[in-house]
Image: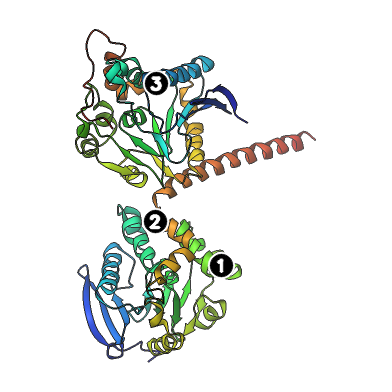
């Protein structure tokens, strides 16, 4: 099972299917009562483009409003990748992409009123690892794939919520290895660092769900309120705020750019002064 | 440390480094403008102009006093006792803004309503509170009009946005206003003054060659003309007072 991925039969009865544009699909199945597996496939590598994000958002809405609360598992139907992250051109040139699709999807997962598990069947890079991080738990295929944040190598800045979710959910040392060293973590090392919680596939995930009684966590507490989503929203409030306020990045970037430019001018002036003095000696 | 130039109970004018001036509106409870207050604001702008003189760098930021309100428009009841109230205050204020020789920035700290809409639009740049505050112009709902009320929306905004503002009384949050181009930046309450100051620092030097007002009037001169036309006029009624007073 581990090398080939979870077979469709094991994922359970199909509850519904949604298309992703013309090329892909999202399938929601239920292997056990109140456990929902979302399997997404948008070849070649499940990039987080607008139709992908919108289909997932709709799937999450359907599960929340039409089915009893339980546990959500997301995984990929493409063997080699959970997802290969953002399509940078698409992200840069699609108006409204960040607030309406990417951040909307991440925010929804981060505050979803059920325990969420990212079943990493294969590679999860950059934006894909961020999506996985928005889940409550991560389980990784021990034999295949690695995870990393390679922005430092690409020369791309991390936007506030992209980095804050790691800051909030990982240790400082792991955070540094991820962001500043672009370490490529295979499953066992990812487990040791705490980036993923367990190793295995769907069977193992179901076992952990049972052990931790996760299905019950989504239900109403003794006071009659279901608070799972509210608890998460407050736990990760900084990241939630960044995901809700994409517009504020513009102003902040503007201030930072101006400050950095000013600091550089001052530095240049001071160094020139030092060079002039040195030359005279 | 900023230097205090005007320090009245309802208005402050402070001078910061680099010829950046900050006008703080603090007329409790909601910074409503009547003709006397409009004249105070005009006096603040004139004070800056006289301090700086021509051909130098400078900028003015107009802000509210808290993160709840910027300005909630005109004191509509003033027209009951003084039918020329706007001609004596509000219209000259907008004319002053549109003629001003230095870049102006409206730091929209919170709710901006009614006449505060054109007041904000008459500034060169707008920074708005991302977390709190709505921007809307309700004359269509109140039965209110003055000749020139549409000039600034028409000249500064996309047609669909101007239509929504004037004919639909649409209400925008900071983020929505940013998307529609009504404001240039949004920022959290804690950071919004910094964004406005940074904008001021960036554009203050553009006043140095003494043509800022001239070139602004190339863009928005129709608005300036419209407001001057109805300023200080007592021989006729210049505006239709609101049928509904809110």
Q: Is residue A148 left or right of residue B30?
A: right
Q: Residue at x 44, y 50 (%)?
A: A249
- Of helix, strand and loop, which one carries label 3? helix
Quick one: quadrant of the C terminus of chain A? top right
- Of helix, strand and loop, which one carries label 1? helix
Examine the rendered structure and indicate whether residue B17 appears above or below residue A193: above
Residue A140 location (% of width, % of height): 45, 82
A194 and A211: which one is in front?
Answer: A211
Q: Residue at x 70, y 35 (%)?
A: A273
Instruction: Name which quarter of the figure residue B212 lies in.
Output: top left
Disc 3 versus disc 2: nearer the observer: 3
Q: Is residue B44 left or right of residue B17?
A: left
Disc 1 versus disc 2: nearer the observer: 2
Of label 1 and label 2, which has the lower sequence position? Answer: 1
Q: Chain of mark 1?
A: A
Q: Which residue is mark 3?
A: B38
Q: CA distance from mark 3 to mark 1?
A: 54 Å
Q: CA distance from mark 1 to mark 2?
A: 23 Å
Residue A81 location (% of width, % of height): 37, 77
* Crowd class of label 1 (few under 14; some 14 to 19; many from 20; radius 10 Å): many
Q: Which residue is mark 2?
A: A244
Q: Residue at x 27, y 31 (%)?
A: B153
What coloring was used for the rendering? rainbow
* Crowd class of label 3 (few under 14; some 14 to 19; many from 20; radius 10 Å): many
- Of helix, strand and loop, which one carries label 2? helix
A17 and A236: which one is in front?
Answer: A236
Instruction: Name which quarter of the figure residue A219 lies in.
Output: bottom left
Q: Which residue is mark 1?
A: A175
Q: Chain of mark 3?
A: B
């Amino acid at each position: 099972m581990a090398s080939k991925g979870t077979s469709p039969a094991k994922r359970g009865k199909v509850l519904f299917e949604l298309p992703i544009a013309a090329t892909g699909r999202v399938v929601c199945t239920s292997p056990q009562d109140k456990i929902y597996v979302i399997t997404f496939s948008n070849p070649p590598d499940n990039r987080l483009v607008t139709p992908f994000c919108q289909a997932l958002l709709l799937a999450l809405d359907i599960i929340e409003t039409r089915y009893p609360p339980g546990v959500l598992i997301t995984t990929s139907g493409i063997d080699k990748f959970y997802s290969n992250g953002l399509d940078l051109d698409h992200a840069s040139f699609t108006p409204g992409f960040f607030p309406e699709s990417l951040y909307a999807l991440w925010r929804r997962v981060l505050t979803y009123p059920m325990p969420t598990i990212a079943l990493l069947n294969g590679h999860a890079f950059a934006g894909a690892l961020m999506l996985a991080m928005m889940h409550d738990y991560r389980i990784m295929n021990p034999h295949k794939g690695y995870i990393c944040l390679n922005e430092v190598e690409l020369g791309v800045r991390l936007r506030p919520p992209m980095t804050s979710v790691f800051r909030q959910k990982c240790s400082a040392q792991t955070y540094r290895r991820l962001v500043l060293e672009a370490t490529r973590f295979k499953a066992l090392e990812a487990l040791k660092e705490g980036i993923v919680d367990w190793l295995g596939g769907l069977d193992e995930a179901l076992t952990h769900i049972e052990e931790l009684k996760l299905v019950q966590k989504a239900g109403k507490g003794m006071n009659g309120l279901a608070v799972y989503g509210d608890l998460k929203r407050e736990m990760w409030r900084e990241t939630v705020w960044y995901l809700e306020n994409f517009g504020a990045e513009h102003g902040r970037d503007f201030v930072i750019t101006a400050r950095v430019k000013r600091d550089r001018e001052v530095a240049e002036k001071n160094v020139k002064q030092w060079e002039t003095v040195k030359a005279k000696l | 440390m900023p230097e205090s130039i005007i320090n009245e109970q309802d208005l402050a004018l402070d001078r910061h480094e680099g010829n950046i001036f900050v006008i703080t509106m603090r007329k409790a409870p909601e910074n409503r403008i009547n003709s006397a207050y409009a004249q105070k604001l005009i006096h603040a702008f004139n004070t800056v102009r006289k301090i700086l003189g021509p051909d130098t760098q400078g900028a003015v930021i107009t802000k509210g006093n808290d993160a709840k309100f910027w300005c909630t428009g005109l004191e509509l009841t003033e027209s009951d006792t003084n039918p020329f109230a706007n001609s004596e205050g509000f219209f000259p204020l907008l004319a002053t803004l549109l003629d001003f020789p230095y870049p102006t920035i409206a730091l929209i700290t919170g709710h901006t309503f009614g006449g505060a809409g054109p007041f904000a639009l008459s500034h060169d740049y707008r920074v708005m509170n991302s977390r709190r505050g709505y921007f809307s112009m309700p004359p269509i709902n109140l039965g209110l009009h003055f000749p020139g009320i549409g000039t600034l929306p028409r000249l500064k905004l996309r047609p669909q946005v101007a239509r929504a503002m004037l004919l639909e009384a649409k209400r925008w949050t900071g983020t929505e206003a940013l998307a529609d181009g009504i404001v240039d930046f949004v920022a959290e309450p804690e950071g919004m003054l910094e964004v406005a100051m940074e904008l001021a620092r960036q554009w203050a030097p553009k006043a140095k060659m003494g043509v800022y007002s001239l070139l602004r009037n190339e863009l928005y001169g129709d608005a300036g003309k419209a407001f001057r036309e109805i300023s200080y006029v007592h021989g006729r009624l210049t505006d239709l007072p609101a049928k509904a007073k809110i």
